[in-house]
Amino acid sequence: MLAEDWGDPAQLRAERLDAAAQLAEKIALEFSNLVTAILGYVDLSLLALEPGSRIHDDLLQAKDAASQASELARQLLAVCHQPAGGAGPGAAVRAGAPARRGTVLLVERREAERFLVARVLEDFGYRALASPDGPSALTMLAGGEDEVDLLLAAWDALGSDGGELAGQVRALRPRARVLLLGGDGASGTAPSALPEGASVLERPFTAHGLARKVAEVLGGA
C-alpha cells in the first residue's frame, strides 16, 4: 500500500536528482553572471589606476580571487550541463585610449550586463550600440545606423532557430560579423544551430578577455 502511495522509489529518486541538478545549474549560471560583472568592473578600475599603487595592488588581489571564482563557475557549469563552461578569463590586452576601432551592435536583455559590456567596448575603442532585444536592435538599424561591424549578442537573443536575429542583421548589414555570449542565466546551452561563421565567448569573461575576443573576430588581434 505504501509503495502504491509513494510510487516507484527508483523513479522518485531520479526525479529528485533531476530537480536538484536543474537547481544547481540555475545557481551556477547566475553565479557565472555575477563573476563576469565583478571581473569586468575590476578590470575597468585597474585601467584607471596607477600600477604599483596600494589600491591597484589590492584590486589585483581581488581580481585573482574573482578569477578563481570564475574557474569554479566554469567547472560547475561543466558538471551541471554538458556542454557548458568555456573560455574563462582572457589574456590581457594593452591598456590605453585607442582610436575608434569599429561599431558593435550589442544585444543583451540584462541591463547591468548590457551597461558593463557597452562600457568595456567603449573603453577599448569601439562604438557600442546597446539594445535589450532583437526587435529594438533591428529598429535601431532601420533608423539609419549605417555602420555595424559586429553583432554581439547573448544566446537568448537569437531566436528559436539560433540564427534568426543574426540573419536579419546580416540582411541589413551584410558585412557584420557575429560574436555570441554563451552560458547566460536564461539558457545554459547553445541554440540548436549557431549562425554561420559565428564565434562564441563563454561566460564568465573578463573585460580584457572580451576586448581580445572582439578584436580577434574583427581581425584586429
Image: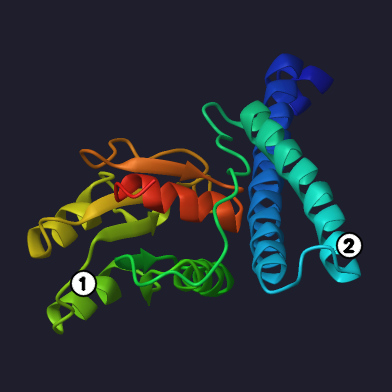
Most foreground residue, 70 or 137: 70
Residue 106 seen from this side:
yes
Q: Position of residue 101 (x, y in %)?
A: 33, 65
For image coordinates 13% across by 83% down, the residue present is: 144
Residue type, mark 1 in image: Leu
Q: With 180 as the anchor, is 188 left or right in this view?
A: right
Residue that badge 2 annotates = 58
Residue 159: mark: none
For image coordinates 75% across by 37% down, the residue present is: 72
For image coordinates 12% across by 63% down, the residue present is: 173
Q: Dot 1: within a 10 Å radius of its alpha carbon, few (fewer than 14), some, or many (20 or more) residues? A: some
Quadrant location of residue 141? bottom left
Most foreground residue, 155 or 178: 178
Q: Compared with residue 12, is residue 160 higher up or lower down, i.e. above or below?
A: below
Residue type, mark 2 in image: Asp
Q: With 60 as the anchor, is 96 left or right in this view?
A: left
Residue that badge 1 annotates = 138
Q: With 40 as the anchor, is 106 left or right in this view?
A: left
Q: Where is residue 164 in the image (x, y as percent from the top left)?
A: 21, 52
